């Protein structure tokens, strides 16, 4: 990445909004994350008509000389996945950008996806294969490069080949899980 950078994203929470609030308001500051601070996360309201079933949390910030190396990218992913372990989420999308390159990352909660009713896991995997998504699996998450629908977790369009090449040049030894 380059001197002026940013990231922003959205987390589709599942049913336990109070767990998210407790973590962000009471525990997150103690973690001393480098990339994430409680103040960058929105705090939703569970009041009709401002939400329906699930709550969407947004977050973002600017940075300087952000994620220049593979080590920094790995640390960013480790910090974010640590946050995900503390909240009840379904799907996440993060966009990382700078002057010359932009990347889209997504996380799917493996447990929620596999246990979802109605064949959601099968459909998600079909979209991943059909659109040739760069997709990784860890014990708790599915992680990938691309854009997803935050309501379904489906990645229904291919990721730009030039962006994948740029990612590979920027982070030639990237492996997941980090």
Image (cartoon, rainbow, N blue to C red):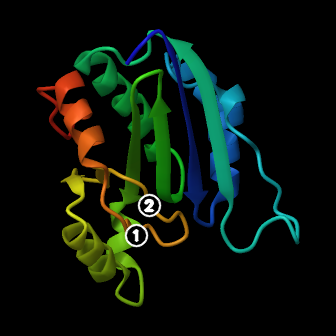
Judged from the image, the secondary structure of the residue bearing numbered disc 2 is loop
Q: Is residue 127 left or right of residue 169?
A: right
Badge 1 density bin: few <14, some 14–19, many ≥20, Cα 10 Å: many
Q: Residue at x 24, y 77 (%)?
A: 126
Judged from the image, the secondary structure of the residue bearing numbered disc 1 is loop
**Nearer to us in this view, 137 or 99:** 99
CA–CA distance in space, label 2 to label 1 = 5 Å
Q: Locate the N terminus and report the quarter of the image it occupies.
A: top left
Q: Is residue 100 left or right of residue 88?
A: left
Q: Which mark is residue 154?
A: 1
Measured as percent of width and height from the top left, residue 46 is found at: 82, 62
Q: Residue at x 48, y 40 (%)?
A: 95
Measured as percent of width and height from the top left, residue 119 is found at: 34, 87
Query: How many numbered marks are there?
Result: 2
**Nearer to us in this view, 75 or 94:** 94
Q: Which residue is mark 2?
A: 148
Measured as percent of width and height from the top left, residue 66 is found at: 44, 16
Specify the farthest residue to the right: 48
Dot 2 and dot 1 residues touching (CB under 8 Å):
yes
Measured as percent of width and height from the top left, residue 54 is found at: 66, 68
């Amino acid at each position: 990445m380059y001197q002026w950078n940013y990231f922003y994203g959205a987390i589709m929470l599942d049913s336990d909004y109070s767990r998210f609030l407790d973590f962000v308001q009471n525990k997150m500051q103690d973690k001393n994350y480098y990339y994430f601070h409680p103040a960058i996360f929105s705090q939703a309201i569970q009041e009709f008509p401002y939400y329906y079933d699930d709550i969407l949390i947004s977050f973002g910030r600017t940075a300087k000389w952000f994620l220049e190396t593979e080590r920094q990218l790995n640390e960013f992913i480790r910090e974010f996945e640590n946050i995900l372990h503390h909240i009840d989420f379904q799907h996440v999308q993060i966009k990382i950008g700078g002057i010359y390159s932009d990347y889209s990352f997504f996380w799917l909660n493996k447990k929620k996806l596999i246990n979802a009713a109605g064949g959601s896991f099968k459909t998600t995997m079909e979209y991943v294969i059909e659109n040739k998504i760069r997709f990784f699996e860890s014990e708790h998450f599915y992680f990938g490069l691309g854009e997803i629908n935050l309501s379904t977790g489906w990645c229904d369009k291919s990721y730009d080949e030039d962006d994948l090449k740029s990612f590979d040049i920027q982070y030639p030894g990237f492996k997941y899980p980090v």
